[in-house]
Image (cartoon, helix red, strand yellow):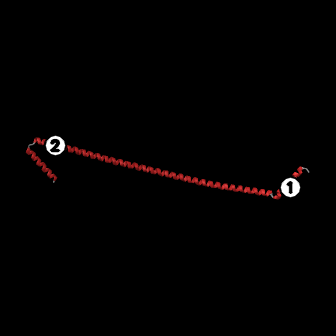
Amino acid sequence: MDATFWALIGLVLFLGLMVYIKVPGVMAKSLDKRADNIRAELNEAKRLREEAQALLAEYQKKRKEAEAEAAALLAAAEREAALLTEEARQKTEEFVARRNALSEQKIKQAEADAITAVKSAAIDIAVEAAGKVIASKTDKTTQTALFKDAVAKVQSRLN
């Protein structure tokens, strides 16, 4: 009986004691429990991943909707700006046309006033010249007769 024999007996006793205390069952239960925990964590991770993918898809959808809405707003703003620009151009053209018409009317009025002034000045000069010619070529009795005739014509026109 040497030491190796006693070591073998100690090992057999130890293993027997382990089986008697049910260490392999406890170890199996512990390993099963750990495997169940790992499975639960994997399932939780899978659920969280699916949830994250759903949130990502939802946010991508919202981003696309926001981009579409922004594009629609931009297009509407561009259309409104174009309409306002066109309206301003039309109003400017109308204003210029009115100003041109008013200027042309003022020019025509100024021309008419100038023609009237020239005619009036010409008539005044002609009357004055005629008066001088008549005064130098006629005698006193003829002048009186012409004056009375002119006064009678004026009175008849006024009445």
Name of the residue lying farthest toward the left: 141
Percent coordinates x, y for residue 107 in the rendering: 29, 45
Which is more foreground, mark 1 or mark 2? Answer: 1
Q: Is residue 130 left or right of residue 14?
A: left
Which quadrant of the figure has residue 132? top left
Percent coordinates x, y for residue 98 in the rendering: 34, 49
What residue appears at the point 58 percent right and 53 percent down from the top-left corner?
59
Depth check: give the residue in front, 6 or 110: 6
Amino acid at circle 2? Glu
Q: Is residue 137 left or right of residue 16?
A: left
Q: Earlier in the sequence, mark 1 or mark 2?
A: 1
Q: Residues within 10 Å of mark 1 (few under 14, many from 20)?
A: few
Q: Please, is residue 123 above or below residue 16 in the view?
A: above
Percent coordinates x, y for residue 153 in the rendering: 14, 50
Residue topped by disc 1: 13
Residue topped by disc 2: 128
Query: Which label number is shown at residue 82?
Result: none
What residue appears at the point 11 percent right and 42 percent down from the top-left corner?
135
What residue appears at the point 82 percent right and 57 percent down from the top-left corner?
19
Q: Is residue 91 left or right of residue 114?
A: right
Whether residues under marks 1 and 2 lie with C-beta atoms below 8 angstroms apart, the answer is no
- Numbered disc total: 2
Percent coordinates x, y for residue 42 in the rendering: 69, 55
Which quadrant of the figure has residue 55? bottom right
Amino acid at circle 1? Leu
What residue appears at the point 25 percent right and 46 percent down from the top-left corner?
113
- Alpha-carbon span between mark 1 and mark 2: 165 Å
Q: Residues within 10 Å of mark 2 (few under 14, many from 20)?
A: few
Depth check: give the residue in front, 22 or 48: 22
Q: Is residue 27 left or right of residue 92?
A: right
Q: Quadrant of the C terminus?
A: bottom left
Query: Which element carries disc 2, helix, strand or loop?
Result: helix
